[in-house]
Amino acid sequence: MTAANDALTSEIPVPEGVKDNIFITSLDKIYNWSRRNSLWPMGFGLACCAIEMICTAASRYDLARFGMEVFRASPRQADLMIVSGTVTKKMIPIIVRLYNQMPEPRYVLSMGACANGGGPFKEGYNVLDGVDKLVPVDVYVPGCPPTPQALINGLITLQEKIDQQSIVTAPWYRKNTPGEFVPVPVLGPDLVDLRQIDLIRDAVGEQSTEIAQGTEVEDLTPEVQDA
């Protein structure tokens, strides 16, 4: 009720006779209040952190208090992605594809040490050291694994972030400002971020030039090299 009272609080005086029937507030406050209390997470988990996420949605912690109990099976009906667990290079293309299918406004919560930065598997050849390498993250929840209380604290932090947004500046309501599209990375010998394809092409070109020049020098006779 605190959030509701804050949204309906105004400095404009209201006559005592109609005080129970009239509320004066700003459009931003009522807009953010309705969104912060109706976040629909996407129902998928990656590793052990997902068990803690499931516990958070159970009756003991009761996410329904925050209006977040409606886990959706489709990204097109969800506006919150909880990345709960180890993000492998094989899984990140699917995560990016799901993120792109979510409608605006959309938010990402990184849950646990593995999703935040690779965790104990950071040096593994198949683990991405942080989901934020490819997907923009709004809130980080530390822990290995985080407790349900920690996840709830992260969700409350996300609500506070939503409270600071405005319809006037929200990018999803502005013309000529498309939502952020993340190219799906390509998994080959290693993970390739297509946003860095120009840098990769330049680096490969420089390396090829150095190799070619080195080959030419090796082909010369020792007398020519000394000269």
Image (tube, rainbow, N blue to C red):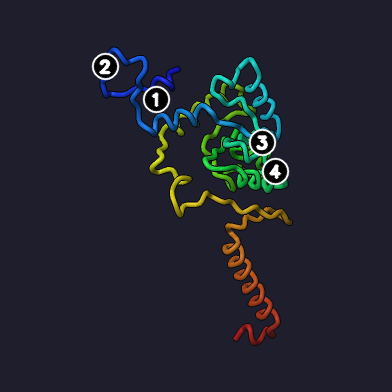
Residue carrying label 3: 120
Left or right side of 76 for 106: left
Q: Nearer the viewer, mark 4 or mark 2?
A: 2
**Image quadrant occupied by the N terminus:** top left
Report, in whole angstroms, how far the alpha carbon at label 4 lies from the one at label 2. Answer: 60 Å
Q: Amino acid at mark 4?
A: Thr
Q: Residue at x 38, y 42 (%)?
A: 168
- Figure disc tally: 4
Q: Amino acid at mark 3?
A: Pro
Q: Residues within 10 Å of mark 2 (few under 14, many from 20)?
A: few
Q: Residue at x 53, y 42 (%)?
A: 104
Which numbered dot is residue 15?
2
Q: Residues within 10 Å of mark 1 (few under 14, many from 20)?
A: many
Which numbered dot is residue 115?
none
Q: Nearer the viewer, mark 2 or mark 1?
A: 2
Q: Nearer the viewer, mark 4 or mark 3?
A: 4
Q: Residue at x 49, y 31 (%)?
A: 35
- The secondary element bearing badge 4 is classed as loop
Q: Amino acid at mark 1?
A: Ala
Q: Nearer the viewer, mark 1 or mark 3?
A: 1
Q: Nearer the viewer, residue 191 or 74?
A: 74
Report, in whole angstroms, how far the alpha carbon at label 4 lies from the one at label 1. Answer: 41 Å
Of callouts 4 and 2, the N-terminal one: 2
